[in-house]
Image (spheres, grey):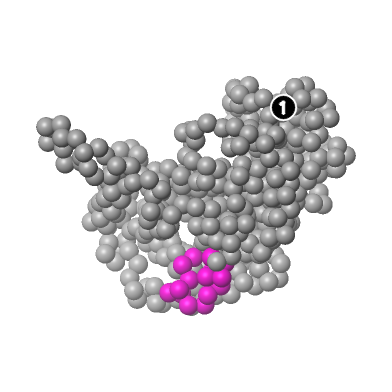
Amino acid sequence: MVGEADGITPAELAAATPLASQALAGVKQLSTSGVIGFPDLPQHTTLAKEIQAYAAKLQGTYDTVCLVGIGGSALGAWALDCAARGPHPVQGEYSAAKPRLVILDNVDPEFVQLAVASMKPKKTLVVVIAKSGATAETVATFLIVRAWLIAGAGAKLAKSRIVVVSSEGRGDLKVMATAEGYQTFHLPENVGGRFSVLSAVGLVPAALIGIDILALLKGAAKMTALAWTPELSDNTPLRAALLHYLALTKKGKTIQVAFPYANRLWGTAFWFRQLWAESLGKAKNRAGETVHVGQTPIAALGTTDQHSQVQLYMEGPKDKVFSFWTVKKPADPGKIPVEKTGFEGFDYLTGQSLAKLLDVECKSTQAALTENQRPNCVFTLDRIDTEHLGMFFQLLEFETAFVGEMLNINAFDQEGVELGKKFTFGLMGRKGFTDFKKRYTDYEARRKG
Ligand code: PA5
């Protein structure tokens, strides 16, 4: 519909079908050989039940869950909280019966101080999440929050108010947690941060704020079954992957706009940005050739960003593909009162609903983009509940893994992030990283000179 120069023709799709089958086989092989663990996470129901039992034991004793973590150790929880408990910042009252989630994922001192000042130490549960157990931002913030907790609640209570999620076999965070007797949960070594929302990384904070984590895993299990289906026409994640791969490599669509038309999916859009960016942005392919490949993910919110970004999307560079995320049945239609005002610009809306307006605006934006030769697709969730969310997370994770295979890259490492982390360790004086301090000093000298 957008024309051959920008859209994927049925013939191009048919010609690329063998590549999709290869990608499916590649991800299956990585999964069965244990190189990657995210496809198996929906089966980890025993762990989910242990987490639920832990949450049930503490229920009623806290009104705030303070999550200290960053990147893949924070964004899944944010996506879940936003979708299940309500969009930020209008989640409503919080209490011991309906605890809130405060995520400390940035080391901006003003942000951390304001957040800490808003919490009561005796009513706060601290969840520290770091797979490596050593991320500077997480460790620094944890040291502040831990000292605040001990000062306000006493050392004894503080011990029972800290829960750690990390790798089982490495990292100082795990060593400290064992020494101090903190509750710990682990994520498998073969599950990377951005693929970890269905591991203890997402499940622990989710259970603590009252989300039904077994329903989440149930939805994800359904999508996993679909993702292993060999037929391209039945396999939604594989088809989405192939279309995005072709849009990137054949049509020059180097940007993907994730465009939810639901505030509850706004957190998921930010979670997805990390998943797509860190997994697919790579310098080398598996053959060791320099490729500098990737598709830049952008998050836009409908209808809000129709009045901010859409001018660029319609008329700017033809470098984007659009993924609309819509919801069939919003929980509340948002009736507009039946009240004639006598103003022509108002009265056509009376008696209708916000849900209809949102839907019409979304469809109108799709039609206008199509007329302007901008390729777009739609993912529709029947409704936003925990089960559908589990399905959607797993769909996007499989889609990402499949595109990685099609590009012949390793979608599961993140060397680009690691270098920045090492410079930080060097500059903050961590033992074993003096080389990186020197490398940074040389760079500064070159910049100035
Ligand atoms: O996807 C990833 O692996 C990263 O984004 C990590 O989640 C992020 O760097 C945080 O790492 P850690 O959980 O070790 O603190």
Picture coordinates of residue 376, whole percent (x, y)? 34, 57
The residue at the point 72 percent across, 40 percent down is 58
Query: Picture quarter containing residue 25?
Result: bottom right
Front-most of residues 182 and 144: 182
Label 1: which secondary element:
helix
Q: Residue furthest right?
A: 179
Write the start and end of the magenta stretch as one range.
223-237
Picture coordinates of residue 263, whole percent (x, y)? 43, 43
Q: Is residue 164 left or right of residue 392?
A: right
Q: Is residue 137 left or right of residue 364?
A: right
In the picture, which quadrant includes the C terminus? top right
For residue 296, say whether it is visible. no
Q: Is residue 214 left or right of residue 174?
A: left
Query: Picture quarter containing residue 312?
Result: top left
Picture coordinates of residue 70, whole percent (x, y)? 63, 40
Compared to 307, does 111 lie above or below?
Answer: above
- The amino acid beneath tag 1 is Lys
- Give the residue at mark 1: 122
Indicate whether residue 229 is drawn in magenta.
Answer: yes
Q: Is residue 94 left or right of residue 252?
A: right
The residue at the point 38 percent across, 53 percent down is 329
Picture coordinates of residue 85, whole percent (x, y)? 52, 42
The residue at the point 70 percent across, 55 percent down is 49
Front-most of residues 399 and 100: 100
